[in-house]
Image (cartoon, rainbow, N blue to C red):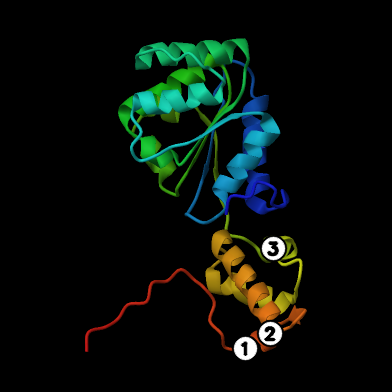
Amino acid sequence: MTNIHEPAQLTNMRLGLATMMRCQEAPAGSPRMGLLYGPSGYGKSVAAATIAARFNAAYVVARSTWTQKSMLRAIAMDLGITHLGRTADDMLDQVIHQLQVAPQPVIIDETDYVVHRKNVEIIRDIHDHGGVPVMLIGEEALPAKLKDWERFDNRILVATPAQPSSMSDACLLRDYYCPRVAVADDLVDAIVRATKGVTRRIVTNLQNVQSEAMSNGLTAIDRATWGHRPFSTGDIPIRRAA
């Protein structure tokens, strides 16, 4: 689910935008680092991309193979730095200088991949010396992981837990993803309950409902019409030995 044009009224988009706004409005010299964290599938990455577009932020998505240089290269390139230094120190200096000259917030998605000492200290350096808000997006354990580094942890201004999708969120998603079929509220409610509010799974089921309805020549569908057909919940079937 990567479409940044999804409705911005979604709860986690509002929470993410409010988190960045607090960091943006914090006085110079005070902590300006924010976290948005929560389980996979809650729409955090879509929220992050929306926040980046709204605040003209540098936005990078961490990878499991990232080294110090990998992370700095990605940030530098997103900031528009074309002639990169040879060493990590050189690139860090370039990133900090660019942020001082042309301030932009920095957003790092999938931060869990880079939570080890050297990369955490680089993020702290960017925050302290670049003088810009830094927002980290990650899984539910991210705040606990960052507490291992006190000098980093005390720079966090606001840590916002992402929320499961509400019925209101699901109806917005329904209106966005099901333009060809009228999906009744009771069917949307059943999807929210079955998926425990995981946004990605709600979207998958809404798309499945529209496809199924259209293949049967329906322009509207409710819970009764859906019947006993299963919902996609992400659970992996386990076959028991005979």
> What secondary structure is found at the residue carrying circle 2?
loop
The quarter holding residue 179 reads bottom right
Q: Is residue 183 left or right of residue 99?
A: right
| Amino acid type indicated by mark 2 | Asn
Mark closer to the observer (1, 2)? 2
Q: Residues within 10 Å of mark 1 (few under 14, many from 20)?
A: few
Q: Residues within 10 Å of mark 3 (few under 14, many from 20)?
A: some
In the picture, which quadrant includes the C terminus? bottom left
Q: Is residue 70 left or right of residue 82?
A: left
Q: Which mark is residue 177?
A: 3
| Amino acid type indicated by mark 3 | Tyr
Of the numbered discs 3 and 2, the one sitting upstream in the chain is: 3
Q: Marks 1 and 3, Cα distance to the nearest angstrom?
A: 21 Å
Tell which residue pokes out farthest to the left in this image. 242
The quarter holding residue 18 reads top right
Residue situated in front as seen by the camera: 211 or 240: 211
- Residue with the mark numbered 1: 227
* In the image, residue 125 above or below residue 208: above
- Residue with the mark numbered 2: 216
